[in-house]
Image: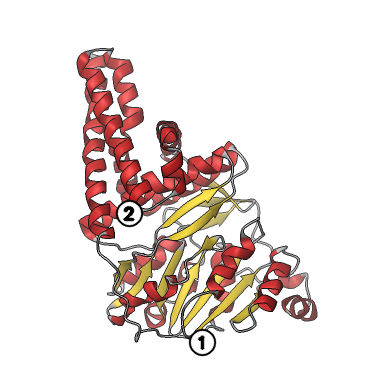
């Protein structure tokens, strides 16, 4: 009796995951087949805000890609928390190499709120001169026409934010697994949500916001204590009466994970954050995990023509969706070169999804936090260091030069 019940429970996600895969393919085709309309006459000035912490092999080129934008007027504000951060000399080199671009480095030693990224951005927000603000992660790289494409929906005054998907890539098999997950699991979910109900949230890689919309929700200070700052930025702008648009421009994202532990911490942080923000949506993800569920179904039900056909149908739909959405439409290198790793990635992702159902503790940038019911970050073991008490104004000013 128990095995029959379990077989039925495992069979349902197998069936629903096939439907999800087919719907994701259809959603991606509908989304990417529409070409962005670019009006050369609409190019309002934009302020690009980026919080930078640490460096890797791609940091300089990631930052430089914004300096090469084919756009008439923009400024780049780079925020660093610690004057001793290794990113500081890289940014100084960037400023020297692109004298024609308005680039400014700001040292932001104060700790405003518990989210370090938002804390940095808050300290440079007042320096932004333009009516549109583009908030980007420091490890994002863009094409030369990205800014021109992303700004286009803002011609409609009802649009308050425009956000972008990303395709990740990085060295090592652990980073490849994470890049594969984002291209073949996360982004298809975004496209399916877009087709079903539109977008009412932001994606951290790149979010362009209308300054008046940001002011209406209380500025960046309103999300300074939350983990899911990108989700909330778009979500609160949507709830303020503005539209949020998913741009056809896809940005590139560099991954540098040094092992399975780092990957697990990253995914658990993401999973627990989603669970707090969208508890029922998070639980509903179980119906998309066809690969691990089909293996459980086979283990419980035994080998038969029916169970093997379910397994084959589920895996075919999953791999087909990964190839079409991640490889063809997103053009993600991981989805094109390592499609055979999808079952491995799905099994790991499902295990971490199960772990994300429990607990509230996360690790982020070397610190430990606990998530409140509202999604706020509660520091465990003390507040973030306020470096303004360690460095005098002269030291901070000298580092910024």
Q: Which residue is mark 2?
A: 190
Q: Is residue 62 shown to the viewer in this render?
A: yes
Q: Is residue 82 shown to the viewer in this render?
A: no
Pointers 2 and 1 in contact (CB under 8 A)? no
Which disc number belongs to residue 129? 1
Task: Please tell me which residue is depicted at 55% across the width and 38% down the height of the picture.
Answer: 173
Q: Residues within 10 Å of mark 2 (few under 14, many from 20)?
A: many
Mark 1 element type: loop
From the viewer's perspective, is residue 7 above or below residue 23? Answer: above
Q: Mark 2 or mark 1: which comes first in sequence?
A: 1
From the viewer's perspective, is residue 53 above or below residue 313? Answer: below
For this view, does 299 lie left or right of residue 69? left
Front in this rendered view, residue 328 or 62: 328
Mark 2 element type: helix
Q: Residues within 10 Å of mark 1 (few under 14, many from 20)?
A: few
Task: Please tell me which residue is depicted at 27% across the width and 21% down the height of the picture.
Answer: 6
Quarter the N terminus occupies: top left
Front in this rendered view, residue 216 or 132: 132
Q: Quadrant of residue 44?
A: bottom left
Q: Position of residue 252 (x, y in %)?
A: 48, 58
For the image, the number of numbered tags is: 2
For this view, does 170 lie left or right of residue 338? right
Front in this rendered view, residue 368 or 129: 129
Q: Position of residue 274 (x, y in %)?
A: 40, 50
């Amino acid at each position: 009796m128990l095995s029959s019940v379990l077989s039925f429970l495992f069979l349902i996600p197998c069936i629903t995951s096939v439907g999800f895969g087919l719907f994701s393919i259809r959603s991606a085709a509908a989304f990417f087949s529409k070409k962005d309309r670019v009006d050369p006459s609409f190019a309002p000035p934009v302020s690009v805000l980026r919080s930078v912490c640490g460096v890797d092999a791609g940091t300089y080129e990631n930052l430089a890609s914004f300096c090469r934008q084919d756009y008439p007027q923009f400024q780049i504000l780079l925020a660093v928390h610690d004057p001793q951060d290794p990113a500081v000399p890289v940014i100084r080199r960037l400023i020297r190499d692109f004298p024609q671009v308005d680039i400014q480095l700001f040292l932001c030693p104060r700790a405003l709120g518990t989210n370090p990224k938002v804390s940095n951005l808050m300290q440079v927000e007042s320096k932004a001169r333009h009516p549109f603000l583009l908030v980007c992660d420091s490890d994002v790289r863009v094409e030369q026409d990205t800014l021109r494409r992303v700004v286009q929906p803002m011609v409609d005054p009802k649009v308050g934010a425009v956000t972008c998907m990303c395709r990740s890539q990085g060295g090592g098999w652990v980073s490849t697994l994470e890049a594969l997950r984002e291209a073949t699991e996360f982004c298809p979910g975004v496209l399916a949500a877009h087709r079903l109900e539109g977008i009412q949230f932001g994606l951290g890689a790149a979010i362009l916001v209308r300054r008046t919309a940001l002011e209406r929700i209380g500025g960046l200070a309103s999300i300074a204590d939350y983990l899911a700052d990108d989700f909330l930025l778009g979500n609160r702008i949507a709830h303020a009466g503005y539209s949020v648009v998913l741009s056809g421009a896809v940005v590139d994202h560099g991954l540098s994970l040094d092992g399975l532990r780092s990957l697990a911490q990253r995914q658990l942080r993401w999973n627990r954050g989603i669970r707090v923000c969208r508890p029922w949506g998070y639980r509903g993800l179980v119906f998309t995990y066809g690969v691990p569920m089909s293996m459980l179904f086979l283990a419980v039900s035994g080998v038969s023509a029916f169970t093997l056909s379910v397994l084959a149908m589920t895996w075919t739909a999953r791999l087909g969706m990964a190839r079409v959405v991640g490889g063809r439409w997103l053009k993600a290198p991981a989805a094109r070169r390592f499609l055979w790793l999808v079952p491995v990635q799905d099994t790991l992702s499902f295990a971490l999804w199960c772990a994300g159902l429990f607990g509230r503790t996360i690790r982020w940038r070397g610190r430990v936090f606990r998530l409140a019911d509202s999604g706020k970050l509660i520091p465990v073991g003390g507040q973030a260091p306020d470096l303004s008490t360690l460095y005098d104004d002269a030291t901070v000013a000298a580092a910024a030069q």
